[in-house]
Amino acid sequence: MTRADPLITGAIKAIKSARNGSAKTQHNHIQEAKRFTETLRRLGYGVRQWKNISNKHIGAVVCEWKNAGLATGTIKEYLSGVRAVTRFFKNHRIAPVNSAFGVENRVYVLNPDLVKTIYLVTAIPIVFRALLKNWTSGRSGL
């Protein structure tokens, strides 16, 4: 039987005792902290306490996540869980902005053609049901 990682057990205790956010938010923060810890271990870092996590550790993990092709929004979400745990352990050395780790802003695409496609995909079943209902009741048209 393997021993539990002290960073993971610390994250679970921190999130559950802080009781910040809904149960779903707490669950997500625990999962995000686990992903961070697993990636940190895979990179060879042996830090054992959240108060000893530095920007160097977070930067290395973010670089690995970017190399793995994770989306900007995903990385930002993971970092929110990491920050929640480090705040609990009074680790104020972590940069408060994601740009410090090379995480760019989200890109929102406003594509009118995509909006039309989504509208058609959702509208066609509605029109079809109305036509089918009218046809089975003996009426024609809408």
Image (tube, rainbow, N blue to C red):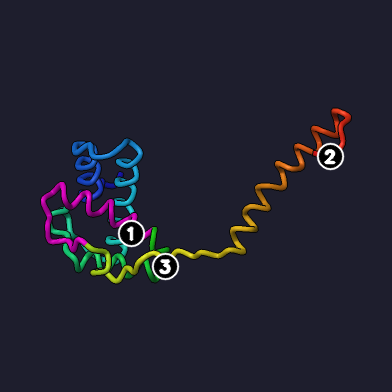
Badge 3 is on which residue?
68
Badge 2 is on which residue?
141
Give the residues drawn in magenta, as a range: 74-96
**How far from the left and from the top, in percent, is residue 134?**
82, 33
* Residue at (29% x, 47% y) in the render: 2
Q: Quadrant of residue 58?
A: bottom left
Height in image: 134 above or below 64? above
Front residue of 89 and 104:
104
Do residues under tags 2 and 3 come within 8 Å of each other at their CB atoms?
A: no
The residue type indicated by label 3 comes to: Ala
Can you say which quadrant of the picture contains the N terminus?
top left
Marks 1 and 2, how far apart in space?
Answer: 50 Å
**How far from the left and from the top, in percent, is residue 131?**
80, 39
* Residue farthest to the top, as pictured: 137
Residue 124 is a magenta residue: no
Front residue of 37 and 110:
110
What's the mark number on residue 76?
1
Q: Quadrant of residue 54?
A: bottom left
Q: Marks 1 and 3: which is nearer the front?
A: 1
